[in-house]
């Protein structure tokens, strides 16, 4: 590695996605020992040898760091990319973190989706919900933003349905809800800052090519 090479910075969405990303990077010879210590409260980790930096952020903040160039590369769910609409190149579907964005609710709510009725939709993803109902279904709805445990919406009578991610479906099942309509498939994506893609083209293209071989 040449001395004047600049650091490439990765922003990883905290949690399972970050762990899976690190495991995948390890397969192509990129390791970050410091980051494996789960008890550490450190936010930034460095691989001096490869001139790489890694930091963990809340998922929805990852596209923001990448858009502004505070990170060159980000790994985040497609759900977050659709919701945040930030400027960055989406370069790779990493194939993990697979789930589906769905409209869910009690079985009885199914007919509310068929007659363009004015219904209430609770979601952590108001943009995705709005785009689906207004632009795809042409149904006028009232969208209520929640920050988690969205399944509560129809149970406590806040909303008729929810728009949320479904992985195994067990959260829905345990709460007497079901998938009513599918919006789109979701998985982890790698994104790249638009300037970094030009300035660091060689290193980033090599990284993408190496990862592609493993997918
Ligand atoms: C997500 C999602 C569902 C659940 C789906 O929630 O919002 O609630 O996982 O997974 P399942 O189909 O395998 O049951 P998360 O755990 O991220 O927490 P949150 O509800 O607080 O957003």
Image (cartoon, rainbow, N blue to C red):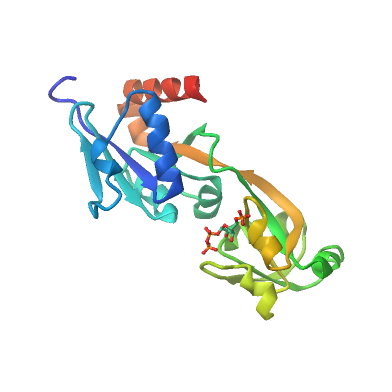
Q: Nearer the viewer, residue 72 or 154?
A: 154
Side of 108 where 48 appears, left or right: left
Residue farthest toward the bottom in the current orientation of the protein = 157
Q: Quadrant of residue 58?
A: bottom left
Q: Residue at x 51, y 51 (%)?
A: 80
Give x and y (percent) for residue 106. 77, 68
The quadrant of the picture occupied by the N terminus is top left
Side of 142 where 23 appears, left or right: left
Q: Is residue 195 visible?
A: yes
Placement of 54 over or under 120, stated as above or below: above
Q: Residue at x 54, y 43 (%)?
A: 97
Q: Nearer the viewer, residue 182 or 81?
A: 182
Q: Nearer the viewer, residue 22 or 75?
A: 22
Side of 59 where 178 appears, left or right: right
Q: Quadrant of residue 53?
A: top left
Q: Is residue 158 visible?
A: no
Q: Quadrant of residue 126?
A: bottom right
Side of 211 where 130 appears, left or right: right
Number of numbered labels in the structure image: 0
Q: Residue at x 42, y 20 (%)?
A: 210
Give x and y (percent) for residue 111. 86, 66
Placement of 22 over or under 183, stated as above or below: above
* Quarter of the image where ligand 1 sits: bottom right
Give x and y (percent) for residue 136. 74, 53
Residue farthest toward the left in the current orientation of the protein = 3
Q: Residue at x 56, y 42 (%)?
A: 187
């Amino acid at each position: 590695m040449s001395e004047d090479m600049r650091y490439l910075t990765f922003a990883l969405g905290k949690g399972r996605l970050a762990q899976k990303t690190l495991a995948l990077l390890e397969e192509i010879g990129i390791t970050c020992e410091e980051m494996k210590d789960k008890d550490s409260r450190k936010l930034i980790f460095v691989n001096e040898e490869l001139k790489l930096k890694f930091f963990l952020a809340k998922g929805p903040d990852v596209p923001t760091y990448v858009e502004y160039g505070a990170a060159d590369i980000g790994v985040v769910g497609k759900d977050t990319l659709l919701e945040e609409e930030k400027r960055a190149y989406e370069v790779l579907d990493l194939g993990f973190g697979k789930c589906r964005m769905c409209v869910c609710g009690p079985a009885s709510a199914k007919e509310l989706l068929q007659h363009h009725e004015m219904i209430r939709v609770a979601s952590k993803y108001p943009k995705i919900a709005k785009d689906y109902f207004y632009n795809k279904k042409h149904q006028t709805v009232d969208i209520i933003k929640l920050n988690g445990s969205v399944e509560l919406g129809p149970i406590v009578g806040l909303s008729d349905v929810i728009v949320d991610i479904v992985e195994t479906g067990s959260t829905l099942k345990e709460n007497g809800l079901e998938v009513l309509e599918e919006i789109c498939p979701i998985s982890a994506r790698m994104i790249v800052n638009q300037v970094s893609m030009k300035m660091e083209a060689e290193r980033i293209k090599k990284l993408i090519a190496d990862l592609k071989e493993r997918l």
